[in-house]
Amino acid sequence: AQKNWEYELGLDRYNNRILDYHNENAINNAIKGCSSSNVDDVTGIDWYNYFRDTYGKENVCWENCNPSEVASAWQGSYPYTGVDKYSNIKLHDGDIIWMGEPFPTGYSTTPEVVQVIGKDAQKVFKGLQVKPYYENGMSFAEYRSSLTPYKVHGELNVADGIAMNNLQFGAGGLVQRFDPNFDYNCANGFLERLDAQTIELTNTKISLEEYFNMMNEVK
């Protein structure tokens, strides 16, 4: 196993938070049919993903997780094959983070980045090394069309780092933050979406030639 856990992770059915439990039925169901050898290889990240998929991302909070560990685990495979370095920081009441939209994922950037880079989607997302969206039949690939600020209520533990190691998607160099409990925090009032301050981005489309050149660079 990648990490030794003092207790197995289970689901508290009363408040839908991931807590340290032992012999919870949800755990037994999750590993039913597994051999003893591959059960030993299941990590905290695996349980985290299992509960999010089973009960809904907005209903699951991993209170004692290491945000940097989760952020790193979400990299290292196609198409984000590079793994960035993160440190854990605490966001405080009133702090602001900015999310690309639609479909925010928990990765964000800072007010300082937004102030300096402005409204150019390609500068924003190439600096954050984000893959543009494409599906068969589209005549171009496209970055997210807006940035929306979210206000912190209370304190949140997040990962903080510089986008550097996925050069297939841009030069990087901008600050990125990751909240492993983003959906839960939005649903439960710990993050407030400030719709009125959303910034509509320009220069969101790239050619298919540029997009496929990016994808051909994925190692």
Image (cartoon, grey):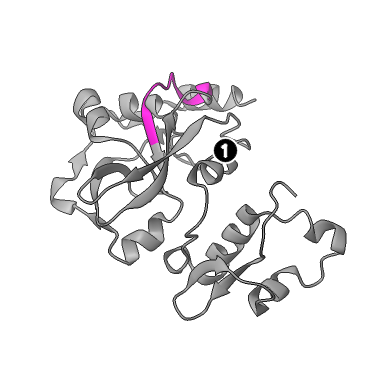
Q: Secondary structure at mark 1?
A: loop
Picture coordinates of residue 184 (x, y %)? 39, 62
Residue lying at the far front of the rendered structure: 6
| Residue that appears at 57% across and 38% down | 75
| Residue that appears at 47% across and 66% down | 60
Residue kind at label 1, given as amino acid type? Gln
Q: Is residue 183 left or right of residue 215?
A: left
Of residues 191 and 114, the one drawn nearer to the viewer in this rendering = 191
| Residue that appears at 69% across and 49% down | 3
Q: Is residue 125 left or right of residue 68?
A: left
Asked where in the image residue 126 lies, by quadrant, the reply is top left
Picture coordinates of residue 48 (x, y %)? 57, 59
Numbered-mark total: 1
Picture coordinates of residue 140 (x, y %)? 41, 33
Asked where in the image residue 159 lies, by quadrant, the reply is top left
Of residues 134 and 65, the one drawn nearer to the viewer in this rendering = 65
| Residue that appears at 42% across and 25% down | 207
- Figure check: 157 above or below 192: above
Picture coordinates of residue 107 (x, y %)? 40, 43
Residue marked by disc 1: 75
Residue lying at the far left of the rendered structure: 196
Q: Is residue 187 left or right of residue 168?
A: left
For the question of whether residue 213 can be seen, the reply is yes
The answer to whether residue 171 is magenta is yes
- The residue segment tinted magenta is 167-176
The answer to whether residue 37 is magenta is no
Q: Quadrant of the C terminus?
A: top right
- For the residue carrying disc 1, how many other residues have a C-alpha within 10 Å: few (<14), some (14-19), or many (20+)? some
For the question of whether residue 206 can be seen, the reply is no
Residue lying at the far top of the rendered structure: 171
